[in-house]
Amino acid sequence: MSSSKDNVIDFQHYKEKREIQKAVPSAESTSHENDFQGKLRLTQEDAEMIIYCMRLGREYFLIEVEEIPDKGGQPQKDLETANRLLDRIQYEVLKLQSEEGYIVHLSFLELMFIVDCVEMTRNAVGKGINVFQSEPGDKEDYTKWLDGTFFYLLDVYEKWRFYQGQ
């Protein structure tokens, strides 16, 4: 990755944006949001892209944790969340499947976290960072794949928000 200021991706920006978007008015809604569990149906391609983006996010959180030796701080919690979600998604992918795709049970907040990781990767690609380390001809294919996964997750996110009455 380039060290240019224009190519620095700040995950916190996406996290703050998502928090503003949900605009939860009361602690009761927050409790409901934490309790909400949904089934995320993933194709092989979507699962692979999410795993890739989560791994990139995990590397970012790991750097943040190493730079800030604050125990129990937000970067540490983000790293733990990324690791936990990666374990669950990879477990589903490694299980033998009887039908096409995978189903991952997630809370609303976990889905938001995944959307943020994918969006962060998408923004990096948009800023010219070759996160896929691909040849120029393959870059368009990876970008389409990333966009498809991102818009699918965003659609699920919006549906879950609607379902919750937000």
Image: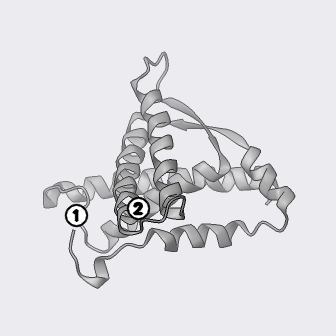
Tell me the kind of residue under disc 1.
Asn
Position in image of residue 50 (x %, y %): 42, 47
Local secondary structure at mark 2: helix
Q: How far apart are marks 2 and 1 (CA)?
A: 24 Å
> Crowding near pointer 1: few (<14 within 10 Å), some, many (20+)?
some
Up-down: is 161 above or below 13?
A: above
Position in image of residue 148 (x %, y %): 43, 52
Local secondary structure at mark 1: loop
According to the image, label 1 marks what residue? 130
Position in image of residue 58 (x %, y %): 39, 53
Which is more foreground, mark 2 or mark 1?
2
The residue depicted at 65 percent of the width and 68 percent of the height is 19
According to the image, label 2 marks what residue? 65
Tell me the kind of residue under disc 2.
Val
Q: In this view, does 128 lie to the left or right of 107?
A: left
Q: Is residue 22 left or right of residue 92?
A: right
Up-down: is 37 above or below 19?
A: above
Position in image of residue 96 (x %, y %): 43, 17
Up-down: is 15 above or below 159?
A: below
The residue depicted at 50 percent of the width and 34 percent of the height is 88
The quarter of the displayed image where residue 5 is located:
bottom left
Which of pointers 2 and 1 lies earlier in the amino acid sequence?
Answer: 2
Query: Could you tell me which quadrant the C terminus lies in?
Result: bottom right
The quarter of the displayed image where residue 162 is located:
bottom right
The residue depicted at 70 percent of the width and 40 percent of the height is 37
